[in-house]
Image (cartoon, rainbow, N blue to C red):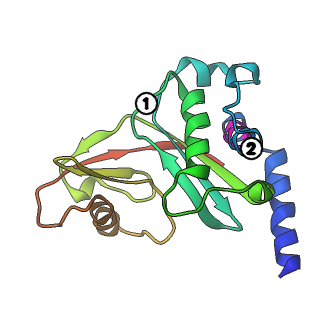
Amino acid sequence: MKNLIKEAKDQIDKINNNEDAYIRLARKSLEEYILYGRVMDIYNDDIPKEMVENQAGVFVIIKQYGQLRGCLGTTEPIRKNIAEEIAYNAIGAGTRDPRFFPVKKEELDSLEYFVDVIKEPEPVQSIDQLDVKKYGIIVSCNSKTGILLPDLEGINTPKEQVSIALQKAGIREAEPYNMKRFEVIRHQ
């Protein structure tokens, strides 16, 4: 077991050394928050221009030893720019995902980060317009909404994708609901 954990940590170190600016910002944001209890000043970091000048919804996914450890995001922008979306969603994924206990400082070295920048969602009239590898989905009925990112392990058909999104939203399949699809730019 110790060898497995060491191998996983070595692999994560290798990944961290090759991470892009999106992943680096997510990692540093959560580390700063967990270690020092503050939100880092993202504008003092080496942030690419496109992250500061553009807005988009962003999801930050955190895994530990290959298993989901936290995920938080929005399909529409709610902050000033992509950099702020990443920073705040990384902190949220590590501390506010209700499925998990907050990340502890001892775990930081074992975490792997993924950042999905959401492209503009578009309405879908039929399940035939979905492709689980290419598109995420948003289902909604009144105030209930379910979101599923694209290319998730174990989801192989549009029917499965819609069914899971409906279940997450608390929408019965017999209820009338709206669907939107979206593409992501995935950083890993």
Residue type at mark 1 is: Pro
Nearest to the observer: residue 135 or residue 31: 31
**Is 181 rendered above or below residue 165?**
above
Residue 2 visible in rendering: yes
Q: Say which quarter of the image contains residue 65.
A: bottom right
| Image location (x, y in percent) of residue 37 | 70, 39
Question: Which residue corresponds to the image point at 34% horizontal and 39% vertical from the top-left?
Answer: 121
Describe residue 57's horizontal placement relative to residue 111 as left or right: left
| Image location (x, y in percent) of residue 176 | 11, 56
Which is the main secondary structure of the residues drawn in magenta?
A: helix
Question: Which residue corresponds to the image point at 84% horizontal and 46% vertical from the top-left?
Answer: 17
The residue tagged with tag 2: helix, strand or loop?
A: helix
Judge the density around disc 1: few (<14), some (14-19), many (≥20) Cα neighbours within 10 Å. some
Judge the density around disc 2: few (<14), some (14-19), many (≥20) Cα neighbours within 10 Å. many
Residue type at mark 2 is: Glu
What's the magenta region?
24-29
Q: Quadrant of the N terminus?
A: bottom right
Describe residue 91's horizontal placement relative to residue 118 as left or right: right
Q: Earlier in the sequence, mark 2 or mark 1?
A: 2
What residue sits right under mark 1 in the picture? 77
